Amino acid sequence: MSNAFDFPGGIYPPERKQRSNQSALIEAPLPSRVTLPLQQHSGQPATPCVAQGDTVKVGSVIAKREGMVSSALHASISGTVGEVSTTQISIDGDGQDAWLRLPPLEWQYAEPHALLERLNESGIVGLGGAGFPAHIKARVVERHTIDTLVINAAECEPYITADDLTLRHYANEVLEGAQITAKLCGAQHIVIGIEDNKPEAIDALKQALTNSQPVPVELTVIATRYPSGGERQLIKKLLDLNVPSGGLPADVGVLCHNPGTLLAILHAVRDGQPLVSRTVTLTGEAITQPGNRWVRLGTSVRELLEQTGLNTSELHQVIQGGPMMGTPLLTLDTPVTKLTNCLIAATLEELPPPPAESPCIRCGECESVCPVALLPQQLHWYARAQDDAKLERYHLFDCIECGACSYVCPSHIPLVVDYREAKSRIRLQRIEATKAEHAKHRFEFRQARLAREEAEKQARKQARQAQQRRPSNTAATNSEKVDLRGLRIAHAAAKASVKKAEKTLARVAQEDPKQSLDDLEMQLATAQENLKAAELQLAQAREQQSSEESS
C-alpha cells in the first residue's frame, strides 16, 4: 500500500542502481588473509583476547566488548592469528572454513533477556548506518515503550542495492528476524518501508507475507526520493510521527532496523552464527562485473574489486558507501568491515571532482531541499564564523548530513563539510566541559569525604568522652546523629552523581556514537563506586545506631 504522509525537501539524483541489481547475490571467494579492525561499530573499540599464533575457527571470539557501548569481534575465516595490535587483528587462513557456532535458540520460547544476550555475544551491529550495537539499541525498552518496529528498506542513496538483493533472496528470513526483534522490544506492529524502484524485492516481500506472521506486518511502498531512508524521514512518511529535535525514534515508540541487520539477527539466534560477513554492493564503471556479494569481514577492498574485473587504468577513486554520504578510500588495502555496504569504483567521467567553490548568492535552493526543514545557508555562515551558540540555536545537530543542500548549491559550497567540522568542534568542547565537570565533582566528593571523615573522627572522640561520663546504654549523642545526617547527605550526592553520569553517557553515545566514550564511562564507574561506598557507610552507621538504641 502507499501512504499520504510526507517530509519536507528531498532531491532526485540519478539512481545508477541498475548496474549492480541485474545479477544474483553470490558469495565472494574465501580470502586467504583477513584484517579485522577493532573499531567496526559505534562506541569503544573491542579488546583483543587472542595472541599471535593462536588457532581460530570461523566464529571464534577474537576481541571482546569493551565498555558500555561496544561490540564483540569474531574470526571471519579459520586459520592462525597473525598480527595483534591496538587497532586490528589479522588472520592467515587455512582454507578449511571450519566453524565454531553458538547453540541455536528457539526464539519463540526464549526469554527476551536470552535473545538480548545472544545479540551481544554475536557482535551484531546496525548494518545500514553508524553501526550502533544491536543489543544496546534493543535496551531502549528499559526507558521507552516500543509500539512499532520499522523495517527500513528504502535504500534511497544512489548506486547501493545491498538491501534490495537481500530482500529478493531472503525475504522470509528478514521477516523472521523482524519477528525476533519485535518480541525482544515488545513491538505490536511491524511496518516495512520500501521505495517503488525495487519491484522484485516488493514482490518477494508480498510472497513472504502470505505466510502467517505472529506480529502483524504492513508493507508500505513509497515514492523514490532522496533521503527517504533517513530514520526521521521514513518514520514521518510511514507513521506521520515527528521525532523530536535532539530525540530518538524510541521517543515516539518506534525502533528501526534495516533488512541486513534483521537477517544477521536471525542467523545469530536461529543458527548460532555471529556476524562474520555481510552483503556488499560492488559497482562503478571501473569494474566489469558489478553486483552484490556475500563478503567475509576483513577482506581487502583491492582483492574484492580485482575479483570483479577492476580496470586500474580507468579507476579515479573508490568510494565506501554512496556518492551522497560515502567517503573516498585513501588506500585499496582497506578491509571490508561491518559498516561497508557499498564500494564504488568510479572513473573520472563518472564522478568528477566538484567545481571550485564560489560565494553564496543567497538563492535559498539549499533550504528548499532540506529534509529536516533547517536553514542551511544560515548554518553555513555560522559554521564559518564558528558561532557555536547560533549553530545550536539553529539546530545544527538535527542535520542528518544527507548532502542534499550541497548537491543543489549553484556555488558548489561543500556545506556538509562545514557542518561536520562544526559538529566535531562542538563535540570536542562538550567532551572538555564534561572532563572539567568530572574533575569538579571528584574534587567536591573528596572534600565531602574528608569533611565526613573528620566529622566521624570527632564523633568517635565525643562518644568516648561521653562513655567515660555515662553508662554504656546511653542513647546516641547529638554528634552521632549529626554524623548519620552527614552520611545521608553524602549518599544522596553520590546517587545524584550516578544519575547525571548515566544521562550524560547516554546522550553523548547517541549524538556521536563514533567518538571515544572512555572518559564518560570512567566517570560513571567512579560515581557508581562512590555510591556503593556511601551506601555501605550509611548502612553501617544505621546498624550501629540501631544497636546502641536497643541496648
Image: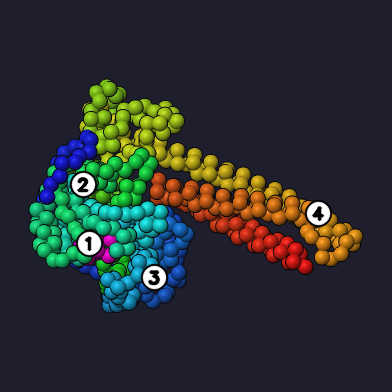
Q: Identify the residue shown where x is 40% and y is 57%.
A: 142
Instruction: State yes or no: discs 2 and 4 in contact (Cβ < 8 Å).
Output: no
Camera-side residue of 200 and 538: 538
**Residue at figure coordinates x 88%, y 61% from the top left:** 470
Circle 1 or circle 3, nearest the eye: 1
Label 4 to label 1, Cα distance in Å? 65 Å
Three-letter amino acid code at disc 3? Val
Identify the mark nearer the N-term, 4 or 1: 1
Residue 333 visible: no
Q: Quadrant of residue 224?
A: top left
Q: What is the distance, in whole Å, between disc 3 and disc 4 at their CAs? A: 55 Å
Q: Which residues are magenta?
A: 174-182
Q: Residues within 10 Å of mark 2 (few under 14, many from 20)?
A: many
Q: Main secondary structure of the magenta part?
A: helix
Q: Which residue is mark 1?
A: 215
Judging by the rendered image, the residue that carries numbered circle 4 is 458
Q: Earlier in the sequence, mark 2 or mark 4?
A: 2
Q: Which residue carries the number 2 mark?
A: 238
Upstream in the sequence, badge 2 or badge 1? 1
> Could you tell me how far apart the alpha carbons at marks 2 and 4 are, in whole angstroms?
67 Å
Instruction: Judge whether 67 appears above or below 435 on screen.
Output: below
Name the residue that disc number 3 marks. Answer: 61
Q: Earlier in the sequence, mark 3 or mark 4?
A: 3
The location of residue 300, given as percent across then percent down, is 29, 60
The amino acid type found where label 1 is placed reads Val
Quadrant location of the C terminus in the rendered image: bottom right
| Mark before the other along the chain sequence, 1 or 3 | 3
Residue projecting furthest to the front: 550
Q: Say what secondary structure mark 2 lies in.
A: helix
Q: Secondary structure at mark 4?
A: helix
Of circles 2 and 1, the one toward us is 1
User: Could you tell me how far apart the alpha carbons at marks 1 and 3 are, in whole angstroms?
Assistant: 33 Å
